[in-house]
Image (cartoon, coloured by chain):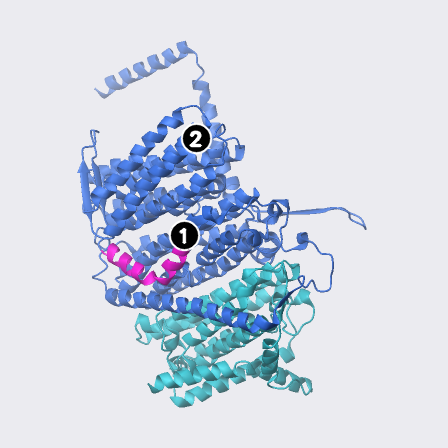
Chain colours: A cyan, B blue
């Protein structure tokens, strides 16, 4: 019962704190650049403001354009509830739930791509095409990294139905494994961090603050959304960022009871700081080089897989 | 007691085939065409409904039937078992819906150009042949029905025979079907020779040696693989499917190519015969599956014709099913129950799901073709506004085939992934790595699938019309779309209720392979069933929640209202629909990376000079195998045959000389051997 209570508490915290991540990223960037920067709570103000506005919609668009933001939010939420938040197993954990989480996020992406194509704008088509490409390339890397951990837990004696569930993979036992000597596993948080940059459209893959539509990926896809729909998309984006940051936290934080919940959130905030650091110190890569970047992440995941299987 | 019902279905097919023969032989007149159309539809409906009743009344269990055959060898032995029943579902279900779809689209054909009676005759023969193939338990009967099933599509594909490309496509189909049949003939003759009888049942292969089993396995893989479209024997699919009428493509892709898969599963189960199959069989099938799936996906990405794209995607999905079978064999030979059960169920689950969404997509493509006159994505766009019901159906199919929850494609993908992931528990590092790499390959395919179907749907239905084809749409009332709506609902329901379907399949197949004795079997069955149940539950909740959020948004906007303004074009004015992204530009970033693998041919021409006036960029994806391998091969065979023509010149006195020479030669041989 306490486990369920802790889990729900963590979920509530995630839902409340997710928009704060953007604030932390921006504040980190501002501090490094020597600026004062936006308020930490700017995302909350933005969301509140957008919810009070009306919408401007292109007459070219139809059902798919209006459906995408709601779908986007719900799939991000569903994916989040499959995670063992704060190292507490999810009440709906099952064998293969990582696949459901990834494919739900895929469904969100699919709907957003369709919404972008629905506007008939060539810029949004361009963004949709790039999003489809990079996420297609990122998908095998994500699962390659997951196989490392499933393999590890099968070797450690977990049964298949346990080992194929996010609640075991990211529930603190994996951290126990690298603490007890499987140091190659420490590369995995790095892989997930790189994937986070790709999936959440951060520098060096995409630049969320650019103002030239030709160079954008995610931002250009949502150019035509406004009002409550834009608020839904922004909030969904912050939940997605929380999801990916949680993957890093799930590998780094060992299972220490209630303490690990606090550690999880601390690691997630640290990840946000790290994103800020990367964004402050790097420029966006040329689109051609993004595949090299993804190739690097893939090589790293493959390396860990080989090391951990050889053991 | 469902065998009589099944036999009744076969009898109805045969009888209505005879009925439509009458208008087929009459002159091409309006009345006879209408009569044929109606008779064909009614016959298919009656037969398929009877068949479906037989399947639903008893989804498992084995029943046999034996009748005199009339030939000196073989017997008319039929049997319905779990595997046959699973494969019969798409035959009856799609047969029914495609017939309805075909009826509405054929009504508009000019009776002077097409013999509708003949069309329905071959349609019924195809269904009859498929039913017999899936239930035959005698190799002679099997071969005869295989031949019926292979020949009938030739006439169905060749419907628009005024078009030389259609004639070419049906010709390619015929050649491919018969090259596969050659391997099958060799397989069955060898089987007969080695076992000494023609029964095609469990227990017949007990006496075979290891080598002959392996040889038989390879022959069957080639013969049945050609029907299933395994690479490199897939080249008939992308030719035949775009050429055939859409309801025929849907049936061929959703039900007929499954017969190849059925053949492979049945053969492997008979040859292994309750022992453990050699491990390399599984690896070979697994690798063939991954290769086929990757190839199909990459080629599909390069296509701009929707039906061609769907044909390549059938190749890809066949590859995925084959991967499941490969896993099942590996798991079985190494004694891993989880892997074996998940693999086999993934194969069959994906087969059922594929029949559902591929049938839907092909029919939807047919509707697009009917309404606009083209299925070339570069000329379409904006159809969602004019045909919203069709758009929702196509979107459902696209999401389902991209394996996205809450639709049915996800269930098969999940089961297959669980099977492949169990690779980590195998004995050696090499095996573990190989299976995990196959898993990564599967994930790469599903990632690309999302891009592919976003493209297919987005280019056809979203944005603005790219040409006059899409602008001047002949809209039909949505009442004619109900086969599509049923299939779309099927995609959703099979996704939400995947767990009972899985349990049913798992119970049906256990008689085929001795899976129950393997370690982990019971746990796998319970645990995967639970996974699918929770998946369905969460997917259902997601749908409800999305509805709730949409309602909330509507309420928020209720007072403020929505304003309509043109799409933001970044400050540029006066853009037109032709500057939209096209299918080729959508896949350009992927093509830059994977172009050589996709077999893209880009030709660019531009005026030289400082002020170029016209420019042209052509992106094509021809089938390289056909050009580089099969074309030269058949040209070579033709030239050899032509060279042999010096012996065949029509001069009778020389023919008599051949006979004389032969007789003398035989005489000398006889004398020498004495």
The residue at which mark 1 appears reads as: B487
Q: Extreme right residue here?
A: B610
Chain letter of disc 1 in the image: B
C-alpha span from label 1 to label 2: 28 Å
Image quadrant occupied by the C terminus of chain B: top left
- Is residue B145 depicted above or below A16 in this figure? above
**Position of B278 compared to B646: left or right?**
left
Q: Quadrant of residue B490?
A: bottom left
Query: In the image, residue B120 lies at what x, y percent?
Result: 39, 34
Labels 1 and 2 in the same subunit: yes
Q: Is residue B242 magenta?
A: no
Q: Nearer the viewer, mark 1 or mark 2?
A: 2
Q: Extreme bottom residue here?
A: A259
Total labels drawn: 2
Looking at the rendering, the stretch of residues picked out in magenta corresponds to B489-510
The residue at which mark 2 appears reads as: B33
Give the camera-side residue of A258 and B8.
Answer: B8
Q: Is residue B498 magenta?
A: yes
Query: In the image, residue A18 lies at what x, y percent?
Result: 52, 81
**Position of B388 compared to A35: left or right?**
left
SS at badge 2: helix
- Is residue B437 depicted above or below A202 in this figure? above
Query: In the image, residue B579 lies at what x, y percent?
Result: 68, 54
Residue drawn 42% across and 54% down? B488
Q: Earlier in the sequence, mark 1 or mark 2?
A: 2
């Amino acid at each position: 019962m306490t486990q369920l209570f802790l889990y729900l508490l963590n979920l509530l915290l995630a839902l409340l704190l997710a928009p704060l991540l953007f604030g932390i990223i921006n504040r980190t960037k501002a501090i490094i650049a020597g600026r004062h920067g936006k308020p930490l709570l700017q995302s909350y103000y933005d969301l509140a403001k957008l919810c009070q506005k009306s919408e401007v919609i292109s007459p070219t668009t139809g059902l798919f354009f209006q459906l995408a933001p709601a779908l986007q939010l719900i799939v991000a939420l569903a994916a989040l509830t499959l995670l063992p938040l704060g190292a507490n197993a999810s009440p709906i954990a099952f064998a293969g739930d990582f696949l459901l989480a990834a494919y739900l996020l895929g469904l969100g992406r699919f709907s957003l791509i369709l919404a972008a194509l629905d506007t008939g704008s060539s810029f949004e088509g361009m963004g949709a095409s790039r999003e489809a490409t990079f996420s297609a390339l990122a998908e095998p890397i994500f699962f390659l990294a997951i196989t490392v951990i499933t393999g590890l837990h099968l070797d450690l004696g977990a049964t298949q139905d346990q080992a194929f569930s996010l609640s075991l993979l990211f529930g603190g036992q994996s951290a126990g494994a690298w603490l007890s000597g499987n140091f190659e596993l420490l590369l995995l948080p790095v892989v997930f961090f790189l994937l986070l940059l790709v999936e959440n459209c951060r520098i060096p893959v995409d630049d969320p603050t650019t103002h030239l539509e030709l160079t954008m990926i995610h931002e250009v896809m949502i150019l035509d959304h406004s009002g409550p729909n834009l608020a839904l998309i922004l909030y969904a984006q912050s939940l997605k960022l929380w999801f990916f940051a949680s993957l890093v936290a799930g590998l780094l934080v060992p299972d220490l009871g209630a303490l690990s919940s606090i550690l999880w959130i601390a690691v997630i905030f640290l990840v946000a700081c790290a994103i800020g650091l990367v964004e402050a110190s790097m420029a966006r890569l040329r689109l051609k080089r993004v595949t090299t970047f993804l190739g690097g992440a893939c090589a790293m995941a493959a390396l860990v897989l080989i090391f951990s299987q050889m053991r | 007691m469902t065998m009589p019902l099944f036999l009744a279905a076969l009898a109805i097919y045969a009888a209505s085939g005879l009925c439509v023969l009458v208008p087929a032989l009459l002159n091409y007149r309006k009345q006879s065409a209408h009569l044929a159309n109606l008779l064909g539809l009614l016959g298919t409906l009656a037969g398929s409904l009877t068949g479906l009743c037989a399947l639903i009344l008893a989804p498992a269990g084995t029943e046999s039937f034996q009748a005199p055959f009339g030939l000196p060898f073989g017997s008319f032995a039929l049997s319905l078992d779990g595997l046959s029943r699973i494969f019969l579902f798409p035959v009856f279900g799609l047969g029914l819906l495609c017939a309805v779809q075909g009826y509405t689209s054929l009504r508009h054909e000019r009776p002077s150009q097409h013999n509708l009676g003949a069309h329905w005759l071959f349609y019924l023969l195809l269904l009859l042949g498929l039913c017999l193939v899936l239930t035959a338990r005698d190799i002679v009967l099997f071969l005869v029905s295989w031949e019926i099933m292979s020949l009938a599509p030739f006439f169905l594909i060749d419907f628009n025979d005024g078009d030389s490309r259609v004639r070419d496509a049906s010709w390619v189909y015929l050649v491919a079907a018969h090259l596969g049949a050659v391997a099958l003939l060799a397989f069955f003759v060898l089987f007969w020779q080695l076992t000494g009888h023609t029964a095609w049942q469990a227990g017949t292969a007990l006496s075979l040696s290891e080598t002959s089993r392996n040889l038989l396995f390879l022959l069957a893989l080639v013969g049945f693989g050609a029907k299933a479209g395994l690479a490199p024997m897939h080249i008939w699919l992308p030719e035949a499917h775009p050429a055939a009428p859409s309801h025929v493509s849907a049936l061929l892709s959703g039900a007929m190519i499954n017969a190849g898969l059925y053949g492979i599963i049945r053969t492997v189960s008979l040859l292994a015969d309750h022992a453990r199959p050699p491990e390399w069989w599984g690896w070979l099938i697994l690798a063939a599956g991954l290769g086929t799936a990757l190839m199909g996906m990459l080629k599909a990405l390069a296509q701009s014709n929707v039906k061609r794209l769907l044909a390549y995607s059938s190749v890809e999905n066949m590859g995925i099913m084959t991967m499941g079978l490969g896993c099942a064999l590996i798991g079985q030979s190494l004694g891993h129950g989880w892997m074996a059960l998940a693999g086999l169920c993934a194969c069959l689950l994906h087969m059922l799901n594929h029949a559902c969404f591929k049938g839907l997509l092909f029919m939807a493509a047919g509707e697009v073709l009917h309404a606009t006159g083209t299925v070339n994505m570069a000329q379409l766009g904006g159809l969602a506004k004019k045909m919203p019901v069709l758009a929702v159906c196509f979107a459902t199919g696209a999401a389902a085939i991209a394996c996205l929850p809450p639709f049915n494609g996800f269930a098969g993908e999940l089961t297959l992934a669980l099977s492949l992931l169990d690779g980590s528990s195998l004995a050696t590092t090499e095996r573990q790595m190989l299976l995990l790499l196959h898993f990564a390959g599967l994930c790469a395919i599903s990632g690309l699938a999302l891009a592919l179907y976003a493209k297919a749907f987005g280019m056809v239905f979203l944005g603005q019309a790219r040409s006059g084809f899409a602008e001047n749409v002949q809209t039909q009332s949505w009442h004619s779309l109900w086969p599509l709506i049923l299939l779309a609902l099927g995609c959703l329901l099979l996704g939400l209720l995947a767990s009972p379907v899985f349990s049913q399949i798992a119970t049906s197949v256990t008689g085929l392979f001795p899976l129950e004795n393997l370690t982990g079997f019971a746990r796998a069955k319970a645990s995967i069933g639970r996974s699918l149940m929770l998946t369905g539950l969460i997917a259902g909740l997601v749908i409800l929640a999305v509805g709730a959020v949409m309602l909330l948004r509507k309420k928020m906007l209720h007072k403020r209202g929505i304003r309509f303004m043109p799409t933001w074009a970044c400050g540029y004015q006066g853009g037109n629909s032709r500057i939209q992204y096209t299918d080729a530009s959508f896949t350009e970033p992927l093509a830059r990376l994977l172009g050589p693998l996709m077999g893209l041919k880009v030709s660019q021409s531009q005026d030289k000079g400082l002020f170029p006036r016209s420019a042209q960029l052509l992106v094509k994806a021809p089938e390289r195998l056909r050009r580089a391998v099969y074309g030269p091969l058949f040209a070579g065979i033709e030239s050899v045959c032509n060279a042999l023509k010096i012996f065949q010149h029509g001069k009778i006195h020389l023919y008599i000389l051949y006979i004389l020479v032969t007789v003398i030669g035989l005489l000398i041989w006889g004398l020498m051997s004495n």
